[in-house]
Amino acid sequence: MSNYQKHPKANVKVRRFPKAFVWAHAINGLAFFALYITALPMYTDFFNWLYPVLGGPAMARLLHRIFAVVFIMPTFILLIFSPKFFFQWMKELITWKKRDLQFFSEFVKELFGFKFKHIKQTFFNAGEKINSVIQIFCAILVIASGFTMWFPEFFPRALVQWGYFLHNVGFGLGIAVIVGHVYLSVVHKHSRPGYSGVVNGKVPAWWAKGHYGDWYDEEVKKGNFPDLDDPKRKKGA
Amino acid sequence: MAKEYVKYVDVTKCDGCRACMVACKNWNDLPAEPTEFLGSVQSHAKTTADTWNVLQYIEHENGKGDLDYLFRHSSCFHCSDAACEKVCPENAISYTKYGTVVIDQDKCVGCGYCVQNCPFEVISLKTYKDKNGKEYRKSHKCTMCTDRIEEGLQPACVTTCHTGAMEFGDKDAMIQKAEQRVKEIKDRYPNAMVYNPQGVGGTHTVYVLAEKPSVYGLPENPKVPTSAVLWKDYAQPIGKAMIGATTMAVVGAFVANKFFSKKAGNDAEDGGGSHE
């Protein structure tokens, strides 16, 4: 395994995500891939062998509809159990400053392993915000068009026809972005220390401080997080 | 390439006997579909998965205070540019060398995309039960009796038509015949026209209509839905290219990281320099 676990301050953890988010994210991710796999044989003939695996086209259709309902749930989980987090998320998505643009040029260097410097970010960095915006946009497209495809008898024919197109755009863009999202979370060495954030909600303090400078400093001021630079710092988080 | 054929339908010669419906059921072995009284002689509202052609009866006020009783043999148009063929995700729908459009029942998964995209709304789904009681669906429509054409026969509906309202033959000859016929009936039906819509590349069922298409409930300018073109010709290939591009990007990033970190000996554990 890599060296980040040997970091001298590796065992100091801070809470990044509420439990509701961890659940919402996991359910959303599971449903996303289940939906992708149950529709894949329709998307490309190369995956037609999935039909017998899934129990035939009719069963694949049924599973796709079950996971479609599961896919819609996370939004409500967040809204009910952690509305504060949800609205903070939304607020950050519409807040764009100079540091967000600076982030991207540094991110490209970071992604390909060049030397880079951290640009101070708030709770979500600019890349996460772009990812969120695209995924929310895609989810709205896919869910809305999913209704017209599932219940064509209740919608005008033209809307059903456009639904097929929009569904395709939604998941086509969504999966392309997910590839990067998953790579950054489980493979890329600078970002994967944050992976535990979507498992138990906690991330290494040193990593949070490096990647979300403004957020970390703010939480230190509030007394929630340990000041890693303070030599008299108490042990533990 | 074999000859392209066209089914010529002159609705002004039709007497509404419905023999074409019976012949179709007979040849294609389709079960009867009993229906409620619909308020006219017409037996079914439109074509279904088990009734591939329906004889329309239309009571039309012709604008001169007279009532015209219009008939039309309605079934699949076998478009040259067929929306159903375009949207089928399983390539189950294809063109034959005769110009007819057929559904491969083994490949059909019953998604219904063709049903929703057909400009003439002639395709329907049928639900079956397999021996374990599990339900599955298949899409059905008129095949223009392609199995008969292959044997040198004409479509069952055409063979049975006793008034000569239907003929089957070489595409160009049939279109010419239709144009000639429209000239003959212009006096009686000033709105008469050849219905061979170019928005779908022309069709392999060509009509001589006595009135405007809308009188028969037909679209005036049918075409492959724009959404279907954007979906199949743009969204789908671009989507596939995009997932390929992001996959290549992360693979590139992975390789680049291995390469550069070896070179640089890698400094800090998160690799980043300090804040500005």
Image (cartoon, coloured by chain):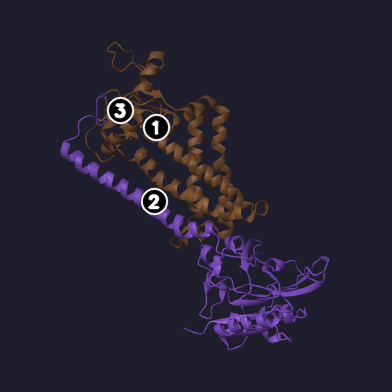
Q: Position of residue B159 (x, y in %)?
A: 68, 86
Colour of chain B as rendered: purple
How crowded is the residue under tag 3: few (<14 C-alpha within 10 Å), some, or many (20+)?
A: many
Q: Position of residue A126 (x, y in %)?
A: 37, 32
What residue sits right under mark 1 in the picture?
Answer: A196
How crowded is the residue under tag 1: few (<14 C-alpha within 10 Å), some, or many (20+)?
A: some
What residue sits right under mark 3 in the picture?
Answer: A119
Q: Quadrant of residue B15?
A: bottom right
- Which label belongs to residue B243? 2
**Pointer 1 chain:** A
**Three-letter residue code for mark 2:** Ile
Q: Quadrant of the C terminus of chain B?
A: top left
Q: CA distance from mark 2 to mark 1?
A: 26 Å
**Three-letter residue code for mark 1:** Ser
**Pointer 3 chain:** A
Front-most of residues B171 and A146: B171
Q: Are marks 3 and 2 on the same chain?
A: no
Q: Position of residue B232 (x, y in %)?
A: 48, 59
Front-most of residues B137 and B170: B170
Q: CA distance from mark 1 to mark 3?
A: 22 Å
Front-most of residues A43 and A48: A43
**Three-letter residue code for mark 3:** Ile
Q: Residue at x 39, y 32 (%)?
A: A196
